[in-house]
Amino acid sequence: MAHEHEHVRVAVIGSGFGGLGAAVRLRREGITDFVVLERASSVGGTWRDNSYPGCACDVPSHLYSFSFAPNPDWPRTFSGQEHIRAYLEHVTDTFRLRPHLRFDSEVKRMTWDGEQLRWRIETASGDLTADVVVSATGPLSDPKIPDIPGLDTFPGKVFHSARWDHDYDLTGKRVAMIGTGASAIQIVPSIQPKVGRLTLFQRTPAWVMPRVDRAITGAERWLHQQLPFTTRARRGLLWGIRELQVQAFTKHPDELGFVEQLAKRNMARAIKDPALRAKLTPDYRIGCKRILLSSTYYPALAQPNVDVVASGLSEVRGSTVVAADGTETEVDAIIFGTGFHVTDMPIAERVVGADGRTLAEHWSGGMEALRGAAAAGFPNWMTIIGPNTGLGNSSMILMIESQLNYLADYLRQLNVLGVPPGPQGTGGGRAALDARPSAVHAWNRRVQERMKRTVWNTGGCTSWYLDASGRNTTIWPGTTSEFRRATRRVDLAEYVVLRPPAATAAQDESAEASAQTGAPEATPATDAAEVTA
């Protein structure tokens, strides 16, 4: 269904946690003139796309949910993909978001119109304009498959973990699993019992800790239903423990040595072969890459139908996969668990700013955004889970809710700045906010300075947290409380207030007339905003 020439106050891109959270916050702020543009045919984001066997969250259920939408009925302490997706459907219905959803509406291009102070958005279901764009596409949305010579000639089945082919039966097949990240450690134990042979291509071993998962009892769920404060207390306890852990990651990485010993003991319990243990033992500080949680990964690797190749995939020759160390293996299927385009998000190539350049071009030297939300040269555009808002040990929902606070205040400021012009020249009419380059750079300098001593920068690993130049543009180097304080309100001194050219010309004429008659000159809204910030 086309929606030609439609205009809305806010366009939200994506319907995962970030997009649905933004939609709920807009309604709670009294804003109903908005749409949520989703490229797929249902909500859920990464929890819709990742449906591979064993897919589950590594953050406890009661912390991996919105504070404004607690779920007393989580079935397990660590929820599976199907439960999280069902939760997001529930949020969509509870907060009456379906009238705002536009499915099968992939955004092809967004272009800033400086004359009208609005975004022109081209989608698969038609074009529209919006005063404000909230980009909530998420960093884990576009799979990354490495460019492997000969891959296009492989006669068997090839797919990425985030695009699982459920019609392909792995029973008895010879399977190559590429990668050892968060997805792979869940896939391996799930498919190991049914495949004929499983070969794991491991470029870098991961630190793995036990996943203390269990079913939440009926008594616990009844208690949470009858006494909602117990759900909040449980969430608060989970949050507090992780806040206390942050210091070790951000300021005192040497303190993580004790955790390494626990991880090694965890491995030794399941892996008795010294040679295999040597392959699986990382040579970097724990926490440098995300610590993975699994109680079944190591036992699966110890099974007789599993081989671990301590090298990455370098070439495909027909049905033979070849590792960088020369190891050759005949396989029927190749599964890539090789992550996503995180520091080079494809959406950035589709956003065209005030100077006619794309966001990808602006970020060619590395992503940076004011308070993780606003990019200079892209007025009235905000991103959820933007640069340096990721976490290494806690729930991203906490960061999303902080950014929603910032979004809400951003819209309030626009409403104040958008008061229609009065008879004496007061009020400036429609307005837009553009982050000052100096403010963006200052914020980024502070973040990068704090990043220097964190385990993510000093731990001796190469991770997806780092961009092509080795700069960490992904992780937040502090507590979630610090980020909450930093995004509580918009500081107008960090922005330039933009007006439509016609409004600016009218203000200039008013000022000239005032000067000729001796009347006091009306203060332009931009200057007023800078002075009062």
Image: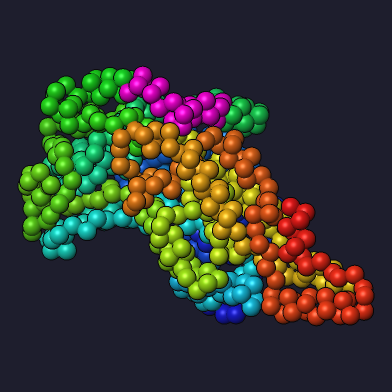
Check residue 112 for magenta coloring.
no
Main secondary structure type of the part rendered in magenta: helix
Q: In the figure, is residue 77 to the left or right of 197?
A: right
**Residue drawn at point x = 75 percent, y = 62 percent:** 527
Q: Quadrant of residue 4?
A: bottom right
Above or below 368: residue 497: below
Is residue 241 shown in magenta? yes
Residue 27 found in image quarter: bottom right
Along the horizontal axis of the image, is 221 left or right of 410? Answer: left
Of residues 360 and 32, which is closer to you in this image?
360
The magenta region covers 237-260
> Which residue lies at the image location 86% right of the left edge and 80% below the top edge?
513
User: In the image, residue 412 lies at what x, y percent?
Assistant: 73, 56
Q: Nearer the viewer, residue 45 or 376?
A: 376
Residue 227 image offset from top left, x and y in percent: 66, 28
Q: Is residue 121 visible in the rendered structure shown here?
A: no
Residue placed most toward the observer, 526 or 344: 526
Identify the residue shown where x is 55% and y is 53%.
Answer: 440
